[in-house]
Structures are given as structure tokens and as C-alpha cells.
Image (tube, rainbow, N blue to C red):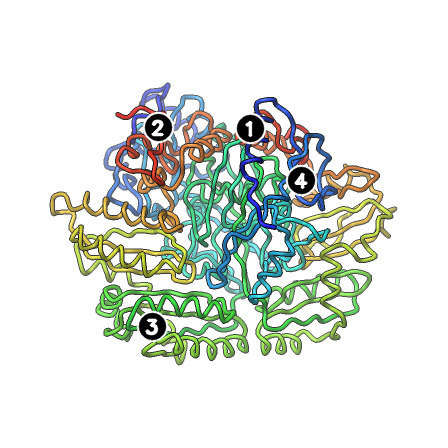
Amino acid sequence: MNSDTSQQLQQQVQSAYKEKTALCIVGANSKAFYGRQVTGEPLNVSEHRGILNYEPTELVITARAGTPLREIEKVLSDNGQMLPFEPPAFSNDATLGGTIACNLSGPRRAYAGAARDFLLGCKIINGKGELLTFGGEVMKNVAGYDVSRLMAGAMGTLGVLLEVSLKVLPIAEMEATQQFECNASEALDKLHQWSKTPLPLSASSFHDSVLRVRLSGATKAVEAAISTIGGDSSDSASRYWHELKEQQQDFFKEDKPLWRISLASDIESLGLPADYENDDCLYEWGGALRWLKSHVPADTIQSTAAKLDGHAALLGTSRHEGQFQPLTPGLLRIHKNLKRAFDPVNILNPGRLYPGL
Amino acid sequence: MHNSEQVESKIDSAGLIDELCSIVPSDSVLFEKEDLKPYECDGLSAYRAIPIVVVLPETIEQVQKVLGLCHRYHVPVVARGAGTGLSGGALPHEQGVLLSLAKFKNILEINPERRIARVQPGVRNLAISEAADRFGLYYAPDPSSQIACTIGGNVAENSGGVHCLKYGLTVHNIQQIKIITIEGEILTIGGSGLDSAGYDLLALMTGSEGMLGVIVEVTVKLLPKPERAQVLLAAFDDVVKAGEAVGNIIAAGIIPAGLEMMDRLAISAAEDFVHAGYPLDAEAILLCELDGTNEEVSEHVLKVREVLKHSGATEVRTAKDENERLTFWKGRKAAFPAVGRLSPDYYCMDGTIPRKQLPKVLESIAALSKEYELPVANVFHAGDGNLHPLILYDANNPGELERTEEFGGKILELCVAVGGTITGEHGVGMEKINQMCVQFNRLELSQFHAVKAAFDPDGLLNPGKAVPSLHRCAEFGAMHVHKGELPFPELERF
């Protein structure tokens, strides 16, 4: 199964650079809904796969970008470890490269960190077809600009990911979920009180008058935390968090446009127009992530998010394209300069993130 | 500075000083020799340079105007916080402006609900934790200079500390920054949520050593103070066993808050200096700090004790109270000055290696120590592989500083050769600029230059630091062969 296709990939990028042909980077195509559509010749990374180095005591794993996420998670869990950012896969075949390129993280994100936080290094092909290595397999490395972290969330527009090194962590000894019946305001209050104390929180969500909190850690610590916070123990919790992460819950059924809104955790109301008061909203990350299903016009939602110093992304569906929060003119200029610095003829996933990038 | 890294200005010194005096009050513009002297170096005093002028703005608008002026007249600018950096990153430019952020020392906001502090760049690292203390919160990254170093410099260097393995570096603990570009434009990077739209410019700016913009505001994340911290001290008769013990602790599923190793010379220096009660017959000691809830710490202390014993520790002590915990740490925290007492000067290196390479690296360092006839004490952030060999020398002996620098360079190249890096937390600055040519090839360095040009096309921000010119590497490379081939075959050699 393991194979190294880096030469073919590099040749394909080099000839696209010469011909100025747009390339559409594809792994398992599991996250096409995230961001804008790209038209271009497919550059298939999924054959470039295999775990290259994994030593549990070093807390580092390095794998080729086309390696299926499930393969990595399996190897880690066999050794009592995990990817701490709990990445959503959205498909059985999702690849490591796509996971990092999208920088999507799951329920543990608010308490452990995002994909970008665990990225130690990567090997990429830039838009000129050059093979470059940044960062490495060590925890602390400040030599040169942090180009590897820049790749996380760049959606392939700055480089084709070939290899990725990630920090991993041990799986907690015990995990338990407690749930509470309350309204949104009470839920945020509770979350903030708990977050100010050293409780072993590892996930939180609020929807439909139910607040759920997951605790992870040493058995005695989790037991003590349960008696501190109270609530009812939640059945089939691990399935709940899995279905939340993978957006398989009923909430995520496509009846209205779905927005991912990232903002300060203590904001109670988004302040959207009154006729949308009954729009459905699901909270995660201690309140810092809101999934909103709403027909409110895109520019209203995004200008609201901007006012709150946050940002809103519309997830794409069969009916409409995905769309990220517009950048301020100053930031857009830097983005365009950076795009040119990595991909001077604009061939890598052009337009996936923003028009012209 | 290498010739290829020079910048030519379009204004003379007198004109520049006049213009600066029209932006900030004249007592905030320093240009007399004796006023400039205190700024001639940062924490790495081996490198010194006197700038044309030092300017100390106190508002964001003034910083914008100063940078706009430098941009217009093509004048190099070096930003400086407290000047505690150890790699010469804030070394002034002889034809340039030294921009001190020392007057930006206000804590603008502490928001316990959001668990953030919004501060000006000249606020000291420790001052943030002190201000957050009444809410039961603190700022996690704790570089050893935390009493003096400022948060702006911490972001510019991506500073670490002894608690990185569990709590991360600066890049993991900040949420938003405001920077001024070389054109004088203000940009807000990051947001009030946990992520932001577009490229991760926050990561790119963190550790960029003042090469991309000047930081004028930082929003840091605060964490709840752990309920309890407990430290264990283990002695070993062999450094290899101590190294294995670190791996065994991690294999047991425990991530300590701090995990430090010291070798024999460092132990005896620290013990002579602060009397921490370290075992003097040990070849290495490990300090392992565990923090978290009461229950978790109790459980982990028992586990770690077992692991240490199984790993061949000759002695394991658990600090019996907070006083003893602080005493255990005192020796480690005083290790640098303690080693300083053994010799007129010492030179602190900062490489990171995959931990399993430790025996090999320590062996090679010992061999180099013999070859260069310079003693070395090793202090090691063992949990994250960050090695600080301290080379003892006497700058008054002719040629000894040069020999020390060459020795230090060899250690860094050794770190790269075993799969590590030339700098774990001190930055490249001026000090390790040549070793950058060893760690990165021509294409990678060119990519760095392209990133720099995306922010600062004229190369005015901190010229000659952090990323070497290809010409510099060509000359340096004449003496060094990278992965079996000359690194820059197409460039001529001088």
C-alpha cells in the first residue's frame, strides 16, 4: 500500500508551472464542501502514502500526505496515543494531507489545541515545483519562519503537502461525559466558571437545551471532577462526540445554509435580525464555535461576525459554494503577496480560499 | 554584516534625526554616543554595534510614522524590547534606527471570562501572570528571563521555557497581535475566537525575529493555575539511563509539566552556588514536575516514582512541601549563573534533537570539548529535546572566543545531523546565521526570502538577521559540505 509518488507529483507541478496550468489538489476529496470550487487539472496525492516514522516515546509521527487518517489513528491508538486535535474525517478515506490543509479540528480543540498547534514540520512542493522542507520532528524549533504552520489552513494554495510531522499525546486513562438541562445563557455561564478552574475538560457542546461536557484524564481526577460539576452521566457519549465531529447528527442535515462561526466564547447573542431568532444554533468549544443554520444573507452574517472580532464560513453544498470571511484590505494584500511568494503563476488550488488567491 | 546584506539609505544622519524629532518629543530621540551605548547589544554581548539613532515612541501612531519615515528614506530598522535575547536578534544596525518599544508597558485588559490579557509589547512576561493571579489565571510560557523579557520579544522569538512540553510555546498561547508594517500600516492578525480566516499569519509572525513587522499589541491566552504542582528529583549514575527514563515516563502516558536534566558539571556548579541538596556523585539528575488537579498529581507521582526506579535511578526524592519543590527548582534555575562562576565567560548554545539521540550527542560534545580544550556543562529541557550546552571560556585569552564560537557552531551542526535544529528557543538572530546555511538548502532559503519580501520588499526590517543571504552561505559553504554536496554550486566563491 505504501508508495512514494513525490517524483511524479513534482514533475506534474513543474510542468504545470511551465504551462501555467491550474492544478486541483485532491486527496480523498472528503472536504470539497469546505471553501470554494477549483477548476484545474487534478493532482492526486492519495497514492503518496505511508507512515515514515513513529516512535511513541518521542511523541512524534511522520507520514506521507496521502496516508489515510484512519490508518494513522489506528497506529496511534494501538500505542495508547492519539492526534490531540481530534480531526473530523468526513469520509473513511480522508487523508492526512487534507486534514492539515484544512486545519479542521474536533471537539477537543478548545482544550488541547488545533491541527496547526501540533504541526512540527512538513515537506512541500511549492508552485514552482520545488521540493522544500520546513520545521522537523522536534518539539521546539525556531530556525527560519514557521512555514509549516502556515500550510495548515492554506487549503493547498501555498504548496502541495508531501509529508507531515505531528506531535501526538497519550490517550487519557478515563473519559466521561456529564449533561445538564439548561438554556444557552446558563450553559455559557457554567462553561466559563469551569474553564477558569483546572478541571480536566476535553469537549463541550450545547444544543436543544442540553449542555454536554466531556472530562478526560487520570481516573481519580475525572471522578473528582464529576463530583465537582455534577450533572447526569451521559449514555453513548463517545458516539455522540464522534457524530458531532463528523457532522452526522440530525442538526447537520441540509435544510438551511450551515455556517461555522468562530468568535469570543462569552458572546451570548450574535445580534442577528429578529426574524431569524428561531434559527438553530449548536455551540462547541466552550462557546467559541457556533454552528448556525440560517437563511440570513451571507453578508449580514459575515459583517456581524467581523463586528464581534470573529469570522464566519459558509459550508458548501450541492446548491451553493463554500465561502470564507472576507479579509480586510491590508490582510488581503499580504495574502496576495504570500501567494505570489509560494506560487508565482497561481497554479495551486487557485481560488479555493479566496478569489485571486 | 555580510556585504550582500547591506542597505543603502537615502538620507543622512542629521536629516534622519531631525525628521524623528518631528514625530516624537526630542527627549525620545537618542543620538549622543553615551546615550547610544546601552543599546549596543542584547543578551548576547559578544556582538555589538552602535546605531545612528535610538527612538522611543509611546503611541502606535508614532510607531507608524517612524516606520513610514524609514520606508521613505530606505533606512534599516531594528525593533527592541527588553534586549534579553540570546542570539543577537536586537543587535542594532550601524546605518539604522533602533526602535525601542520600552514605553509600551501597559496592560490594556484582563478578561477573566475570555481568559485573555491584552497587553502592549513592552509588558514583561512575568507581569502578565502577576496581573492575572487574582483571577486564578496565568500566562504559561516562562522563558528563564521572564522577570525581565517583554511579551513583544517573546512573540518575535517564539519563546519557550521549562513548561513547553505540556503547555506549548508562545505560538500556542497567543490569540491576536497588532503589527505595523514597514509602510506604517497597522494590521490586526488573529481574532477573538480560537482561529481566524485566511492564512495563519499569527504563526508566521511568531518567531519571525522582527523581520516582517513591528508588534505593537499582543493578546495572550491565560490558563487556570493548576491546583497543585509536585516535583520529583532522580539521580542516575549514567546519562544514558537518565535519557531512557524520560522516554519511559512518556511511554507510561504521562506528560510532565516540566522535565529537566543536568549533567555532572552543571549539578556541581548549581550545588556550590545555591545548595539545593543535589546528589554530587550523580552523573545526571532529572527534575520531573507534575501538575494538575490534586487527584491527578497524586496518581502520577506514584507512577513516575515507579518508572524512575525501574529506569535505574540510584535515588528518587519527592519534594515534601512547596519549599522543597522550590529548592529543587532553584538549582536548575540558577544553573546558568552557577556555571558562570566556574569560568570568566560562558557561551550558551540552544539546539534541539530527537531525544533518543541524546547519548550520541552528549558523547560527541564531550569529544569536541576535548578537541577544543574547553569544558562544557549540559542543561537539557529533556522533555522536548532542547539542549543547552554551556561552553566555559575566557574572552581575555586571545583566540578563545573564536574557538568557542567554532565549537558552538559544531554543536549546532551536530544537532542538524541527528535530525534536530540549530535553535529550539533562542532564535537565529546574528549568532546562528551561518548555521542556517547548514539546516536549509538554497531553495528553502530563497523561499524564506520570498516570504520576507511579501512583507518588506526593500529588506529594511532587521537586515542581516535570521535568514542568511545566498552569498553569505556560498562563502560559509566553502568550508562546509551539506549532505555530501556543496550547497550552492551555481554561486561564485569569494
Identify the secondary structure beneath mark 3: helix
Q: Residue at x 26, y 67 (%)?
A: B267
Q: Are marks 1 and 2 on the same chain?
A: no
Q: Are marks 4 and 3 on the same chain?
A: no
- Where does label 1 land, which residue? A14
Which image quadrant is residue B279 in?
A: bottom left
The alpha-carbon separation of the residues under discs 2 and 3 comes to 55 Å
In the image, which is nearer the foreground, mark 4 or mark 3? 4
Q: In the rendered structure, the residue with mark 4 lies on which chain?
A: A
- Where does label 4 land, which residue? A26
The alpha-carbon separation of the residues under discs 4 and 3 comes to 56 Å
Please tell me how crowded label 1 is: few (under 14), some (14-19), or many (20+) other residues with Cα within 10 Å.
some
Compare marks 1 and 4 and give the one earlier in the sequence.
Answer: 1
Measured as percent of width and height from the top left, residue B206 is found at: 48, 44
The alpha-carbon separation of the residues under discs 4 and 2 comes to 36 Å
Measured as percent of width and height from the top left, residue B281 is found at: 23, 74
Q: Are marks 4 and 2 on the same chain?
A: no
The alpha-carbon separation of the residues under discs 1 and 2 comes to 22 Å
Measured as percent of width and height from the top left, residue A234 is found at: 75, 72
Q: Residue at x 60, y 77 (%)?
A: A219
- Where does label 3 land, which residue? B327
Q: How many marks?
A: 4
Q: Give amino acid for label 2.
A: Pro
Q: Quarter holding the C terminus of chain B?
A: top left
Identify the secondary structure beneath mark 2: loop
